[in-house]
Amino acid sequence: MSDVAPAGTADPAQPSAPHHHGQRQGLAGLAIGAIGVVYGDIGTSPLYAMKEVFVGHHPLAVDQLHIFGVVSLMFWSLMLIVTLKYVLIILRADNNGEGGSLALLALIQRRSGAAGGKRWGPSLVMLGVVATALFFGDCMITPAISVLSAVEGLATVEQGFDSFVLPIAVTILIALFYLQSIGTAKVGRLFGPIMILYFIVLAVMGVMHIAERPDVLWALNPAWAVRFAVTDGKLAFLALGSVVLAVTGAEALYADMGHFGRKPISYAWLGFVLPALMLNYLGQGALLLETPAAAQNPFFLMAPEDWRLPLVILATMATVIASQAVITGAYSVVQQAVQLGLMPRIRITHTSASEAGQIYIPAANWALMVMVLLLVFGFGESSNLAAAYGIAVTGTMFISTCMVGVLIRRVWHWPIWAVALFELVFLTIDGLYFASNLTKVPDGGWFPLLVAVIVFVLLTTWSQGRKLMLERMREAAMPIRIFIDSAASSATRVSGTAVFMTSTPEGVPHALLHNLKHNRVLHERVILLTVRVTDMPYFPSDDRFLHEDLGQGFHRVILRYGFMEEPDVPANLKSFDGCGAAFRMMDTSFFLSRQTLLASERPGMAIWREKLFAWMLRNAESAMEFFRLPTNRVVELGSQIEI
């Protein structure tokens, strides 16, 4: 079982932790870093967004109405969804510097509890879990579609290069996942300059074609989007499923806030990334006005023929960076899910001694690689993958809007009319995009939905299974006072310290009962230790411990961490002086309880889910490794539990 207490049991009145995204680097340095990491996904959208609109599964006629209408939709989507909703509003919802669906969920639960917001609890948790499940589908599709779309640019250089696209894309992707274990700290320093060059190239290519057809600037008028919708309503609705590809990656602005901070991300978007993207989309529109046949691949055909190969190389580098950012994001979400009790313990390796965010999760890495390669071989080209892409993104955006509505009402205390206006506007926009993408389910949209369903079942099964298991353990638990009065005086006491890891700060741990039953001894100092993960990203180090002296050498200790931290129990115990003499690892033994689950007909979960939970429990990383316990000081005792 997990020896980590659920996050929801944390004290509501918790001290705040300082933001950790290193303001010492300076605003400019952080903004450059944000350009390299945060905007890789949305920055590579011009490679396939316009192409998919005009030659995808619901192609449009390449004429002025449709070109102006599509460019207008892209511009106002970027302004409303990314700039207004994410940059100006959602980025303010930071959980002590951290962002993302799970961080937002934890923030709302902690901050709204005292205001009567607990009735939102189950609904909010479900929304957060669904958003997390959809995110994993997005993580699989982004590397596949980004790298494929960049390498497909080779076809614009030389027609005979078509047959090399798939092998080159697969080689790049395998190399990308293989290199994850080395760590991205050194490579990360190159991300900013490469992406800055990439965005400059986007802007320059756009300006070149706008100069030839300046009338394309009229597309910025929202009247063209309205005219497109009125004139050709059905196709305009279907086109939204491709137009939304221009805003894929908007969630990264919020999810990566912990690495850079709100201001650098905002300034980088408003001052550099947004202008570069819009100039490029306007330039692609101008190219299509002049040469409708360029719709086959407008991004690469914008460049003069001699410059297309260097552009393919630069675009491929940008897509690798975008994929790297998504993979790193997947690691962070897995880590948060483990710490918040939504996933079993899993091996997490830190690849940098100085940067807490530089982590590598082998199981997640290889699972992602397998799924990405299956997508590349299964769909074959970026246009086919585009049909699968939008559903996960728009679904996550829709859920974020719902969760932020609760936040701005319960935590920020906006007036009800302002909350209603916010929800009406953005739920309508997100709902239209999501509904349009649902039409692509038969063409590939089923994939992210299938992934989301599988991940949702796994997350909820683990969460519910842990809850049931803790309830069964509490039912059989002996009150600690009765145990101390009866056992402390009769058992033989031996020198040293025994630390009994327990999931709940009540009752007597099973390992303690079994140890006394079989060995008939108690140590001079007995610590009943519960590790509790709070709904804060980073917990203040000077306030980690809650201590209760139970008498006769017994102590109840709660050790608290943030959900972005990696527990190191021995290191923290060494710094704790509340239980008498300092802890010496050579005189300390750690006792763990390993439960074997027996599926039963008792009310709780369906039998198949109980068996699934038991399988997940058996394959979870051992508590010894997860808590960094010294291998030669651990005693593990087993028991059986029916759920």
Image: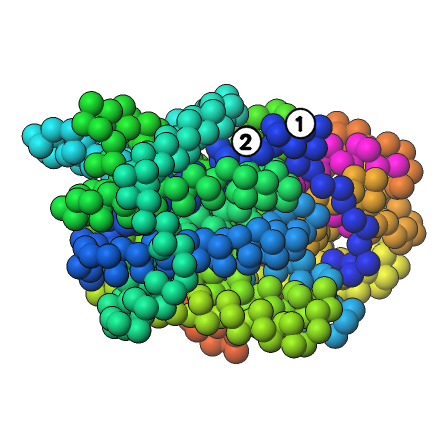
Residues under numbered marks 1 and 2 in contact, where contact means CB atoms less than 8 Å apart: yes
Question: How busy is the neighbourhood of tag 2: few (under 14 within 10 Å), some, or many (20 plus)?
Answer: many
Question: Considering only order in the chain, which callout, 2 or 1, is on the residue closer to the N terminus?
Answer: 1
Above or below for 443 versus 312: below
Q: Hey, what amino acid is under mark 2? A: Gly
- Between marks 1 and 2, how big is the CA–CA gap? 10 Å
Q: Is residue 123 left or right of residue 239?
A: right
Amino acid type, residue under disc 1 in the picture:
Gln
Depth check: 610 or 456 in front?
Answer: 456
Seen at 61% across and 57% down, the residue is 89
Q: Quadrant of residue 241?
A: bottom left
Residue matched to label 1 = 25
Residue 212 in the figure: left or right of residue 491: left
Task: Inspect the magenta stretch and tell me whether residue 18 lies in it.
Answer: no
* Residue at 88% across, 52% down: 548
Residue 438 seen from this side: no
Q: Secondary structure at mark 1?
A: helix
**Which residues make up the magenta segment?**
557-577
Residue 540 at x, y = what percent? 78, 42
